[in-house]
């Protein structure tokens, strides 16, 4: 594992005047303190719950259900975060201890241990995000394999129905909340400050906290297998969710932790992008990845509180016997779906726009051409952002909502195809007359465009209400979301990981293995998901463990393909691990890119830039003689010292 | 920018891709059998949209395949492409053409949707009661006859009024195309106008719990005469409860009958003039979750009733009040049916 060990430590940890004093190892922020504080906070939560119940004469005083919610799912994670040191600086400040705002003691990675602590370096956090999310991707993928094993034959073969329902629910929740959304956040965490010419994110300590919420959410989802109840699908519709066994609260609380992480990161991105651009970096000179994360962050900040609310309501109905969704007590069952989809449709774009950004970077660089129609590309992101909030009810065409909502929602849904189409055609026009290098990142990016077109076209079919009525809740939907989220999001995540792997690790990956990975995934992916369109239209509903024999042969074919698909990711994991340990050293700019992250060494210095870069032109001026995006090392005018910012 | 040779190559690739995809669309039997007027509209939208999709896909595929073959360079080629930053005319075209295409889809869809919501001919009203994991149908215009399979007259519309007892379910018959969620607390509705005699699958498509995959029934389309005859027979024999005031009172009217003169023959119990097809009742209400060899059911959600022996009052209590994951059937089944089931399951008289 290569770190920035070779880089001289430019800022020593400040232990002298003005810094908090060194503490005993059990009291200093870190894993030992995290372990005992997790236990301590659990006991505090336990005491509060049981004590209050005893005081109020509730029978029985020791009721494990509120204890789990308060002590295990709320207090203990806070204890873990405090113990690890995520709140140390703020706590010292609030308690009046001496603090230094520019304390860099927790910045940068000098050994592998620095990846396992609260680290304020956006590059370390980016790598923490990406590796953690890949872990959850593999866990979620394993669940998909188990689901497909069950579906290989029509009868129930391996799992009882409750376990099966939990498998596909946790699969979806992990992939959405702990893989795609945070994986993009992780890549952007690493790249965006570099692209902006900034030394770090605007709020490095908040950034560290956002990351450490993720393992908590993921652990809760994995732990839910020991507490049955997360079996209502990732949509968790009441009244099924409210009548599930108690374990359903693990889903509700995991979503809260993951959602809080998303919101904090998004705020951080917004402030960073708005206030920390290098001199000369106007909005119209920002790389499209930055634009994409800007719009994504707006979506996250506006929409995520809605899913938090919807899951709180479900949990309150379960734990506190409120009546948000209980029809026998004037609850409004469909209200849940409106709130849920008001987040979860924009969430589709939260999972897609950063991928658009990555595809734009990769396609432009490997075609050696400026991105076609740069301004329209940025504006179409904004159009998707605005339209994205007006289409949520297309998930509810058969839900029983007011019928007059259907046609307006169909029109806005179909209209989103226009800005999306602009992006696809612009990528194709960027390829046109380029000098195309099909390196691994480019294969993934072009593969993404072709697969996303299929997902987009099936999306148009779903947007048309009469077709949607027929195929809602069938395997057609399963096929569509996997073309969008696997062929779309996952392909761009791989494009991004391969593209920035040299920058992140300072090593080159094995190009042949990367290409093998792409082709195996590409073929197996299509064999797995394309036939699902057919069996869906013909009448196979989703979320079933048994099905009619008429679908048996297609399902067997799909299951076998899916195992190949699963195996193809092992090539990726092998390639990443081996290349990170012993790949050939990477040059600063292996792809001859123009954006600022390629102007610094691989991996970048701990504080990114010794001097602030001066942005002098557009980010994709390939083929324009003498054109540059930015100048480093005092070549241009207006360079300033980092400290002067 | 575009040479003649490139245009020719692009059009050729696009035509080949379009032909292949059209063949896939045409020769693979995508849609299930069509058995309702509503499905005709749905199929029309489907084919128009698929046509537009094939057009778009062929264009995209042609450009990317051509670009990948033609503009690819060797890894050691360090030259750059031509610095084309954009072209306002082309950008207007690829904004306008998709807008027009989706407008066509939207208008067509809206028209078909309006037609599919409207009933045709003398409407036949049926209340659908969905619960974990069974269907019950009450025929408002046939003296509130009840059944666990859906009987429909051909050639005129049936309006289903859908009620849920517990969680959200969804009613779908692929051959009819129409689908509607059944939401506790509100009544939803759905129009079906069958055009073909036969038996079709009723599928619950909204995850509704452990027995979701087994929440199935049949929709049986009869000729008008057969439908009337069936309805008459249902009324004469009481079907599952001859209540005249709707489902809520089903249980009460049935309790008036005395427990005398009952004969149990095979799977049919006749009590006080009421004919209960107990095997059918079991198959459609219990078989989704329970295995029972003599009823030919293979559900695995609940206990296997072929092997488990239950005391009669224990069985009756369980059927009436549910518990342990099983829903209560009191009110859903008539007293006659419950008693018949208890006898059928425990062998008691």
Image (cartoon, coloured by chain):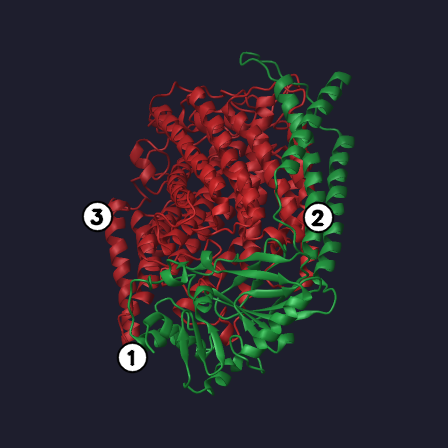
**Nearer to the camera, B154 or A36:** B154
What residue is at 59 percent from the left and 15 percent from the top? B73
In the figure, is residue A46 to the left or right of B52? left
Secondary structure of residue under mark 2: helix
Secondary structure of residue under mark 3: loop
Q: Which mark is residue B45?
A: 2
Which chain letter matches label 3?
Answer: A
Residue A43 image position (x, y, % from top left) = 25, 61
In the rendered image, which residue does mark 1 sit on? A57
The relative height of residue A615 versus residue B165 in the rendered view (above or below) is above
**Nearer to the camera, A53 or A644:** A53
What residue is at 68 percent from the left and 46 percent from the top? B46
Q: Which mark is residue A26?
A: 3
- Closer to the camera: disc 3 or disc 1? 1
**Nearer to the camera, A274 or B136:** B136
What residue is at 39 percent from the left and 51 percent from the top? A164
Residue A47 image position (x, y, % from top left) = 26, 67
Q: Which chain is red?
A: A
């Amino acid at each position: 594992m290569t770190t920035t060990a070779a880089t001289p430590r430019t800022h020593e940890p400040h232990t002298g005047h003005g810094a908090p004093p060194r503490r005993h190892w059990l009291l200093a922020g870190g894993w030992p303190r995290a372990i005992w504080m997790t236990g301590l906070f659990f006991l505090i939560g336990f005491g509060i719950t049981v004590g209050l119940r005893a005081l109020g004469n509730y029978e029985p005083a020791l009721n494990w259900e509120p204890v789990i919610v308060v002590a295990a799912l709320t207090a203990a994670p806070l204890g873990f975060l405090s113990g690890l040191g995520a709140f140390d600086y703020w706590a010292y400040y609030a308690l009046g201890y001496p603090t230094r705002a520019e304390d860099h003691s927790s910045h940068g990675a000098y050994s592998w241990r620095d990846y396992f602590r609260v680290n304020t370096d956006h590059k370390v956090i980016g790598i923490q995000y990406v590796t953690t999310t890949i872990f959850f991707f593999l866990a979620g993928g394993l669940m998909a394999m188990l689901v497909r094993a069950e579906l290989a034959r029509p009868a129930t073969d391996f799992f009882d129905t409750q376990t099966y329902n939990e498998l596909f629910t946790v699969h979806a929740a992990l992939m959405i909340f702990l893989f795609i959304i945070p994986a993009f956040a992780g890549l952007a965490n690493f790249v965006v400050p570099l692209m902006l010419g900034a030394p770090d994110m605007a709020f490095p300590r908040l950034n560290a906290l956002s990351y450490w919420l993720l393992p908590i959410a993921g652990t809760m989802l994995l732990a839910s297998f020991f507490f049955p109840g997360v079996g209502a699908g990732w949509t968790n519709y009441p009244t099924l969710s409210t009548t599930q066994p108690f374990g359903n609260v693990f889903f509700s609380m995991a979503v809260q932790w993951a959602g809080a992480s998303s919101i904090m990161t998004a705020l951080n991105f917004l402030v960073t992008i708005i206030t920390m651009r290098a001199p000369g970096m106007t909005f119209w000179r920002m790389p499209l990845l930055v634009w994409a994360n800007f719009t994504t962050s707006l979506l996250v900040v506006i929409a995520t509180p809605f899913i938090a609310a919807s899951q709180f309501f479900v949990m309150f109905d379960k734990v506190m016997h409120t009546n948000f969704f209980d029809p026998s007590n004037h609850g409004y069952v469909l209200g849940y779906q409106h709130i849920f989809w008001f987040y979860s449709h924009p969430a589709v774009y939260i999972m897609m726009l950063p991928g658009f950004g990555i595809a734009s970077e990769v396609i432009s660089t490997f075609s050696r051409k400026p991105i076609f129609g740069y301004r329209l590309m940025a504006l179409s992101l904004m159009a998707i952002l605005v339209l994205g909030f007006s289409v949520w009810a297309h998930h509810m065409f058969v839900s029983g909502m007011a019928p007059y909502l259907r046609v307006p929602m169909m029109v806005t849904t179909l209209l989103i195809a226009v800005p999306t189409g602009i992006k696809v055609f612009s990528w194709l026009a960027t390829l046109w007359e380029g000098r195309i290098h099909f390196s691994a990142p480019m294969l993934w990016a072009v593969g993404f465009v072709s697969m996303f077109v299929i997902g987009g076209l099936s999306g148009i079919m779903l947007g048309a209400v009469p077709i949607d009525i027929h195929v809602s809740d069938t395997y057609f939907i399963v096929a569509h979301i996997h073309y969008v989220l696997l062929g779309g999001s996952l392909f761009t995540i791989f494009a991004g990981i391969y593209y920035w792997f040299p920058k992140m690790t300072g090593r080159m990956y094995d190009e042949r293995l990367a290409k093998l990975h792409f082709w195996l995934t590409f073929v197996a992916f299509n064999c797995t998901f394309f036939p699902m369109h057919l069996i869906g239209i013909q009448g196979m509903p989703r979320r079933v463990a048994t099905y009619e024999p008429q679908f048996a042969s297609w399902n067997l074919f799909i299951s076998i393909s899916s195992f190949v698909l699963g195996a193809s990711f092992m090539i990726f994991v092998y390639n990443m691990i081996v290349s990170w340990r012993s790949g050939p050293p990477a040059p600063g700019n292996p792809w001859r890119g123009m954006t600022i992250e390629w102007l610094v060494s691989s991996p970048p210095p701990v504080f990114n830039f010794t001097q602030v870069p001066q942005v002098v032109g557009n980010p994709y001026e390939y083929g324009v003689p003498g054109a540059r995006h930015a100048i480093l090392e005092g070549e241009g005018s207006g360079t300033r010292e980092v400290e002067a910012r | 920018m575009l040479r003649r040779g490139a245009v020719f190559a692009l059009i050729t690739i696009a035509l080949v891709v379009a032909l292949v995809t059209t063949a896939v669309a045409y020769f693979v039997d995508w849609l299930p059998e069509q058995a309702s007027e509503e499905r005709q509209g749905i199929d029309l939208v489907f084919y128009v949209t698929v046509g537009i999709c094939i057009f778009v896909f062929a264009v995209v595929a042609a450009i990317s395949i051509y670009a990948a073959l033609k503009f690819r360079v060797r890894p050691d080629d360090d030259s750059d492409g031509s610095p084309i930053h954009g072209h306002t005319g082309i950008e207007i075209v690829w904004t306008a053409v998709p807008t027009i295409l989706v407008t066509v889809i939207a208008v067509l869809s809206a028209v078909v949707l309006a037609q599919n919501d409207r009933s045709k001919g003398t409407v036949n009203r049926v209340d659908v009661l969905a619960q974990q994991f069974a269907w019950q149908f009450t025929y408002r215009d046939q003296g509130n006859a009840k059944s666990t399979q859906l009987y429909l007259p051909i050639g005129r519309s049936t309006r289903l009024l859908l009620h849920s007892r517990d969680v959200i379910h969804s009613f779908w018959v692929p051959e009819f195309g129409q689908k509607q969620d059944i939401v506790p607390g509100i009544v939803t509705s759905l129009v079906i106008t069958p055009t073909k005699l036969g038996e079709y699958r009723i599928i619950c498509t909204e995850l509704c719990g452990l027995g979701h995959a087994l929440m199935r029934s049949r929709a049986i389309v009869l000729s008008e005469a057969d439908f009337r005859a069936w309805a008459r027979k249902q009324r004469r024999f009481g079907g599952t409860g001859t209540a005249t005031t709707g489902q809520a009172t089903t249980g009460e009217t049935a309790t008036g009958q005395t427990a005398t003169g009952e004969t149990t023959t095979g799977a049919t119990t006749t009590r006080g003039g009421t004919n209960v097809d107990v095997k059918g009742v079991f198959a459609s209400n219990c078989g989704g979750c329970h295995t029972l060899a003599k009823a030919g059911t293979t559900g695995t959600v609940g206990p296997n009733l072929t092997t488990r022996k239950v005391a009669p009052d224990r069985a009756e209590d369980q059927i009436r009040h549910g518990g342990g994951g099983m829903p209560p059937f009191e009110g859903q089944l008539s007293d006659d049916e419950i008693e018949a089931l208890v006898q059928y399951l425990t062998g008691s008289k």
